[in-house]
Image: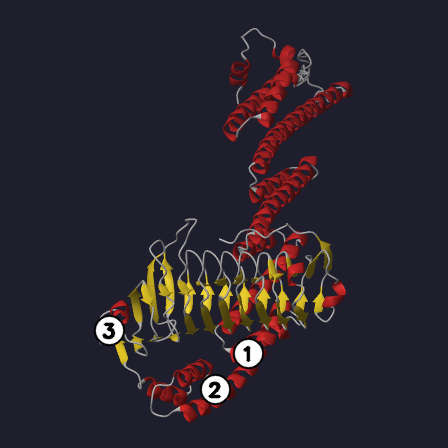
Amino acid sequence: MTLEDARKVFGLGPDDDAAAHLAEFREARERIAEFVRSAPNDTLALRYQEALMELDRALAALREQTELPEVRVTPEPTLVPEPPRLPAAVTEESARPEPAPVISKRGKGSKVLNWSLVLLLAAMGGGYVYLRIEEDKQLQLKGHVTLLERQGATFIESRRWQEARETYEQIEVLAPDSEIVSMGRRSIEAGIDEEQRQFLGYWMGEGLAALESNRLDDAQKAVELMLSMRPGDPGATELRGRIERARSFEKIQNELLAAKLKLDARDWEGAITASAAILHTVPGQPEATTILAEATAGQRKQELDFNRAADLLKQAKALDQGSFNPKALEILHEAAVLAPADKEVAALLEKMSSYSRTVRVPGDFATPADALANAHDRDRIVIDAGQWKGPLLIDKEVELQGAGSGKTEVECPADSSAVISFGPGARGVRVTGITFRHQLLDPAAERFSVGLVKGGEVSFTDCHFLDGAGHGLAVIGGGTASALRCRFAGNGWDGASASGPGSTLLARECEATGNFEHGLDLWDGAGGTLTANRSEGNSRNGIQIDAKTAAVTVSDNQLKANREFGLVLASAASGDVRGNSISGNLLGGLVVRTLSQKLVVTNNRIQSGKTPSIVLEEGLSASAYRSNEIKGAVMDNVSFDPAPPEKP
């Protein structure tokens, strides 16, 4: 840059003395450098940097002109010839050559000194120029470092770590000992650490939320992201362990569900294999232990059933005289339930059933209702698989035979009637292999049951009573109902219930699950025998006994996971309560009130957790129940309400 251009940069007039303003110009230069360092963005920083570089060049030009010492050169002395001599006669002396002019020693030394001074001053001026050039270079370098420092800070703020590292590497090349480099790198490491902590904190929260909601795949993804950011992070490692334990628990739960489904389907061998596999992985797992025990007992019972079916077959053969025999038919129906795959039992049942008139639906009549309307005592009505419309009313001695509880279904609206009803004339009626259900729900105070036995005598084998507005099966008016291997589920009141003096319910090997009141219930003077049933997951008690003056037998039932108690003995005149397995009920195991103290309660297995295993009303002695296997607390001297609530 020329001196004239430099003076224009600083706004100096022709007569202004630049040297007098150099200090001000340097101060202005430092202020512009500060603008570069503190610019809010890169665009402004670059503009400030361009101005700074132009200012540095102008300042260098001014300094070069104003601060360079003046070099003064002493002129070389002039040699003056001697004045001419007058001519003389030629003599011997004049014939000699004339001597050369003599220069004085002082004059020659002065000449050498002057030139040395010139060289010295020139060297000093050149050195000064070199120093000014080097100073300008340093100023430009400083400006470039300032710009890079600004860029590095911007990259750190925007978390562009690699670009920030590269920027500080450039600064290190330009200024190896600069504190800026170490400070920048510390800022990068601190920023990366903060970013990692924020990243890990966010994904830890996401992972925990996913784990708590059992979204294990999402939780696993969160862990993988955390470990990709910081391998070996303790929080991520601990969360991964929790996920693995949750997966293991979920796997066990799925295996337990599969084993339970096999148990419910009476696939004893499959349930034994599945539960044993769980116990191999998790020794002592309580539910698997229970399933294994029940499946093993079921398998043993199945073997006994086959033997029992063989004995019944022999009895039926002995009774076969070629004519209708209700006793033989009852025996054969039971044998068919015990050994459904036994072809000999099925063949004899078909033969002896043919001794009475057989009416087929839809072969002989279009609907079950038409067939019943035209039936006579002792007729057998065979209903094909499919869905049929009710209601059905039976008031005569007939046999109603379906294709199987999962194949033949009869239904009707919940607010219109019971699906099937039996009157006082329905004596010796047998119903096998049919599902009865209500359509939709009916929340009315008075509700119809799915099945109603009013004063008659009916036996049900392999029948289902589902989704009733009221009870699944209700026995009233002195009627008697026996249920063998039937199912009562999802009903608005009890699964199966007998009420009123003279009414009787005989339930054997039945299931009562998911009903909104009790599973099985004998109340208001009704009696009965409840043996080897499973009552589970009902909203109140597994079995409720309030028989008053009637006798009852409650034996070998499984009562578990009901929302109140497993078994409540409110009142009964006499009977036995033995061999029942009661566990996992929400409020407790067994309740005994003083009006049922004549019942003999022995050899029951009662297990409870935080709730009492046995609750005894005031006046009952705990010593009377020591023969039971009790795991849990015994609560005695309990005061109950004066009277139980009214039954719906």
Q: Earlier in the sequence, mark 1 or mark 2?
A: 1
**Residue 575 at x, y = what percent?**
62, 70
Mark 2: give few (<14), some (14-19) or many (20+) Cα within 10 Å: many
Q: Earlier in the sequence, mark 3 or mark 2?
A: 2
Q: Quadrant of residue 463?
A: bottom left
Residue appearing at x 73%, y 58% in the figure: 619
User: Mark 2 = which residue?
Assistant: 309
Identify whether 31 is placed above or below 150.
above
Residue type at mark 1 is Gly
Residue type at mark 2 is Ala
User: Mark 1 = which residue?
Assistant: 298
> Dots 1 and 3: beta carbons under 8 Å?
no
In the depicted view, which residue is nearer to us: 508 or 279?
508
Identify whether 389 is placed above or below 164.
below
As helix, strand or loop, the secondary structure at mark 2 comes to helix
**Residue 467 at x, y = what percent?**
41, 59
Residue appearing at x 62%, y 38% in the figure: 171
